[in-house]
Image (tube, rainbow, N blue to C red):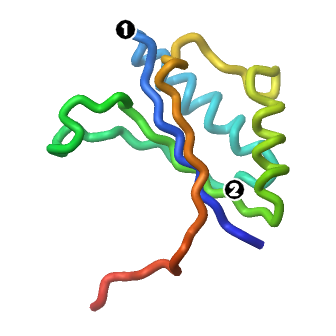
Amino acid sequence: MANFSFLVFTRPAPGRDEEFNRWYTGIHLPDMLKVEGFVLGQRFRILRAQPALESPSWEYVAIYSIETDDIRRVMKSLNARLGTADLPMSDCIDIQNLHGFLTEPITPVVHAAG
């Protein structure tokens, strides 16, 4: 079975940070993990302490792990669910700045020596 990562970069609608974080963590993240093939999900805050990201377009990234032999089928299922009762969206997300990137590994995991 192949492994993929799906990185989703987001930010809340202006002035709706708390609502956005409650919705994403309490509703959206669990709903995403109901999509067949999605096995793990975790959210992160993008730190502004990076010189290349003085003014990033996003504030958060969610990283999902997907295990499947048919990634097209998984993504088709995800897209079919988006905006339905199975995977409702909220107006507390800045939809214009939502970007998702599907990735596949090209090397094995490398661990630090020692």
Mark 2 touches mark 1? (CB < 8 Å): no
Q: Which mark is residue 15?
A: 1
Distance from disc 2 to disc 1, alpha carbons, whole Å, reads 32 Å
Secondary structure, mark 2, is strand
Residue 81: % across, % down: 80, 30
Residue 43: % across, % down: 47, 42
Q: Is residue 96 left or right of residue 52?
A: right
Residue in the image at 56% along x and 69% along y: 105
The quarter of the picture where residue 85 lies is top right
Q: Say above or below: 6 vs 96.
A: below
The quarter of the picture where residue 83 lies is top right
Residue 63: % across, % down: 53, 49
Q: Quadrant of the N terminus?
A: bottom right
Q: Say above or below: 103 vs 56.
A: below
Residue in the image at 72% along x and 21% along y: 88
Residue 2: % across, % down: 72, 70
Pick whichever, 80 or 47, lies toward us.
80
**Visible residue check, residue 41:** no
Q: Say above or below: 9 vs 96.
A: below
Q: What amino acid type should be assigned to the residue bearing mark 1?
A: Gly
Residue in the image at 67% along x and 66% along y: 3
Callout 1 crowding tier (Cα within 10 Å): few <14, some 14–19, many ≥20? few
Secondary structure, mark 1, is loop
**Visible residue check, residue 51:** yes
Question: According to the image, label 2 marks what residue?
Answer: 39
Q: Residue furthest bottom?
A: 114
Pick whichever, 15 or 94, lies toward us.
94
Q: What amino acid type should be assigned to the residue bearing mark 2?
A: Val
Pick whichever, 99 or 43, lies toward us.
99
Q: Quadrant of the C terminus?
A: bottom left
Q: Which mark is residue 47?
A: none
